[in-house]
Image: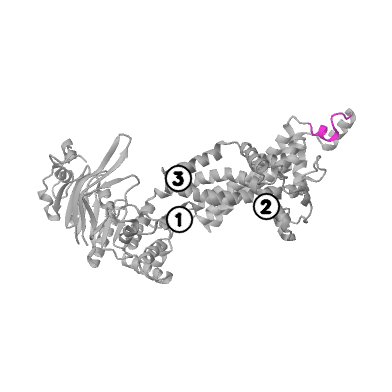
């Protein structure tokens, strides 16, 4: 019962945060020194056309009225129409977001699968050569800008070694070969049982996912190491050893068991970060995801698209934050 | 079962060289109750934990001899040590708030110890754990079995800890300040419980404490440690005949109901105590 109450309290804060998010994105969109009218009519349009477009967009009205109208449209799921693609923003997001999610999901699986064991190993062998190597590898993940690694990786694995296919999500040959059901290309290829498309999609996915995973891995490994060092210094670890348990059981059951919940939180937030933070990686790899959509929309002053994409990213982040909070409250016996 | 410690030294590397925490300690422990008394940092815990080789990371241990029932602990590999830890010698730590795993139920932790050293499945381990909880005089074992450590009081937690260490039927129990974190009334209960269990099971006990009168009341023999050395070893009844000024100082600064004094003595420390007997090596 206590737990349910705690969950309810966590959930209650969501609408407030959501409202704040909408307000801030809306304001940023309006105060930016970009004229959305010019984006639509072009900068050679006569003055009366510009004025008419301005009137049609409702830009002549006070800001709070504009916000009220925006909220009203948002409530019925209307994010407006993108000037650039001439689709509704919602349609665009449905098309682009799965590509980002596909990338981020593969990346987080790589990152956790490698980062957690590395972090545990580094903590158990603290101060040893293994620890130092792991820390240097992780330090690079923290300090290298992601585009440097992305470009280097393209240069080495695509341009020089020809191991990886080039940028993009699939070879131009396979464009539209499988029906878009989920918009996750790998899943769609599986559903269509088109192994060629699947192979091509996976091949295109590996490189950007690996680049993205490297940075997430560095963070996860560093956090795992820090948490584990803390846990291993705990008295209960001495107790576990005094019981005569094997080193593996002391490390994984007792020490790791104590940090698992915290790691789940870290991973949920990292995943959310990957979903929104893939902007640079997507641009370098020409990955047709939300990040790329956002960048191009921004460069074209396509404000509806920018606001819509920002909102989606924000809501996703909020959702994962909430999920992490809930998992923490459900799984850790000490939180009540 | 006999533990032999001869010339045990434990040191930690620091920026300015080795810092010695235990210096040339020699002890023999048979089937008896031995108290080790000393202030914080006197090396009493390290000495006792060296028997299980559960020293903090970085500790350097040297000794002429360190054996448990004929097993050379200095040379034993990890699997040989695991055969001693828990199975033949248990360790009870000071504060159950920290020494119990916070995300495992009390019952699961006891059952784990039970299964580690005895043959049997989950059901037998569960029964074994319930039985152990009853042995440490817990009235509602079923509730405590399913409780997490933070849901238990200090005394309750320490009973769980004791039950866990008794699970494999050890021959030696090392209790490292088992009552220091508990309320005074609970302290007495836990000590009585320990006394009772040790007598009933015929276990040897090493009781580490900073409370000299308590230890001498409870144990057959007392070793007093100061600055990493044993400065005096006494039979429990011989406390009045203590010779070392540190031991005498400890006794004199205690209030007594039978001889009320307006002012308690303050111990004056002699730097020579830390240097050990004349001619003792510094290591």
Depth order, front residue of A88/A282: A282
Residue highlighted by disc 1: A252
Per the image, is A252 magenta? no
The 10 Å Cα crowd at callout 2, few under 14, some 14 to 19, many 20 or more, is some
Q: Nearer the viewer, mark 3 or mark 1?
A: 3
Per the image, is A39 magenta? yes
Where is residue A194? Give x, y as percent. 74, 59
Image: magenta residue range: A35-45
User: Looking at the image, can residue B173 be seen?
Assistant: yes
The 10 Å Cα crowd at callout 3, few under 14, some 14 to 19, many 20 or more, is some
Identified at 54% across, 38% down, the residue is A140
Instruction: Give the answer, above or below, for where B112 lies relative to A22.
Output: below
| Residue at mark 3 to residue at mark 1: CA–CA distance | 19 Å
Residue highlighted by disc 2: A202
Identify the mark nearer the N-term, 2 or 1.
2
In the image: residue B169, left or right of residue B107: left
Task: State the scheme by which the image is colored.
Answer: one colour
* Residue A130 numbered mark, or none: 3
Instruction: Give the answer, above or below, for where A100 lies relative to B80.
Output: above
Pointer 2 with pointer 1, Cβ within 8 A: no
In the image: residue A145, left or right of residue B149: right
In the image: residue A193, left or right of residue A1: right
| Residue at mark 2 to residue at mark 1: CA–CA distance | 33 Å
Using the rendered image, report if marks 3 and 1 lie on a common chain. Answer: yes
Identify the mark nearer the N-term, 3 or 2.
3
């Amino acid at each position: 019962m206590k737990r349910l109450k705690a969950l309810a309290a966590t959930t209650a804060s969501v609408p407030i945060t959501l409202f704040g998010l909408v307000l801030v994105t809306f304001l940023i969109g309006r105060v930016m020194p970009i004229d959305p009218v010019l984006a639509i009519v072009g900068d050679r349009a006569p003055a009366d056309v510009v004025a008419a477009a301005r009137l049609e967009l409702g830009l002549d009205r006070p800001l709070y009225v504009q916000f009220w109208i925006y909220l009203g449209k948002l409530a019925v799921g209307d994010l407006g129409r993108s000037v650039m693609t001439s689709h509704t923003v919602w349609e665009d997001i449905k098309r682009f977001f799965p590509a980002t999610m596909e990338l981020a999901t593969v990346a987080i699986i790589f990152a956790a699968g490698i980062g957690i064991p590395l972090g545990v190993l580094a903590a158990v062998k603290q101060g040893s050569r293994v620890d130092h190597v792991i820390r240097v590898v992780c330090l690079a993940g923290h300090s290298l800008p992601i585009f440097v690694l992305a470009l280097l990786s393209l240069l080495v694995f695509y341009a020089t070694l020809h191991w990886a296919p080039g940028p993009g999500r699939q070879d131009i040959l396979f464009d539209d070969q499988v029906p878009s059901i989920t918009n996750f290309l790998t899943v769609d290829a599986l559903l269509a049982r088109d192994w060629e498309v699947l192979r091509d999609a996976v091949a295109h996915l590996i490189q950007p996912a690996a680049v993205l995973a490297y940075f997430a891995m560095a963070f996860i490994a560093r956090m795992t190491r820090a948490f584990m060092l803390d846990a291993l210094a705990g008295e209960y670890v001495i107790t576990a050893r005094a019981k005569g348990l094997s080193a593996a059981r002391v490390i994984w059951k007792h020490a790791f068991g104590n940090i698992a919940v915290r790691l789940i939180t870290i991973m949920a937030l990292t995943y959310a970060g990957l979903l929104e933070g893939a902007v640079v990686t997507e641009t370098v790899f020409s990955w047709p995801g939300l990040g790329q959509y956002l960048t191009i929309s921004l460069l074209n002053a396509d404000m509806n698209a920018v606001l819509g994409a920002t909102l989606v990213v924000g809501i996703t982040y909020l959702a994962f934050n909430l999920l992490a909070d809930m998992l923490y409250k459900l799984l850790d016996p000490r939180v009540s | 079962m006999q533990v032999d410690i001869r010339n045990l030294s434990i040191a930690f590397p620091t920026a300015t060289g080795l810092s010695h925490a235990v210096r040339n300690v020699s002890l023999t422990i048979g089937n008896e109750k031995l108290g080790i008394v000393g202030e914080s940092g006197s090396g009493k815990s390290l000495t006792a934990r060296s028997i299980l080789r559960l020293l903090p990371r970085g500790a350097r241990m040297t000794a002429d001899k360190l054996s448990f029932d004929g097993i050379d602990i200095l040379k034993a590999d990890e699997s040989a040590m695991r055969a001693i830890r828990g199975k033949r010698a248990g360790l009870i730590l000071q504060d159950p708030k920290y020494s119990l795993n916070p995300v495992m139920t009390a019952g699961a932790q006891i059952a784990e110890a039970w299964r580690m050293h005895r043959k049997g499945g989950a059901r037998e381990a569960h029964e074994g754990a319930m039985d152990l909880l009853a042995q440490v005089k817990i009235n509602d074992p079923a509730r405590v079995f399913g409780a997490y450590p933070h849901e238990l009081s200090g005394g309750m937690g320490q009973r769980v800890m004791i039950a866990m260490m008794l699970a494999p039927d050890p021959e030696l129990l090392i209790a490292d300040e088992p009552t220091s974190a508990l309320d005074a009334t609970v302290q007495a209960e836990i000590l009585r419980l320990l006394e009772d269990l040790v007598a009933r099971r015929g276990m040897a006990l090493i009781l580490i404490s900073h409370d000299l009168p308590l230890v001498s009341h409870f144990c057959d023999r007392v070793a007093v440690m100061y600055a990493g050395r044993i400065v005096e070893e006494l039979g429990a009844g011989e406390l009045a005949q203590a010779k070392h000024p540190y031991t005498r100082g400890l006794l004199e600064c205690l209030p007594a109901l039978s001889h009320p004094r307006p002012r308690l003595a303050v111990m004056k420390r002699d730097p020579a105590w830390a240097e050990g007997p004349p001619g003792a090596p510094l290591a």
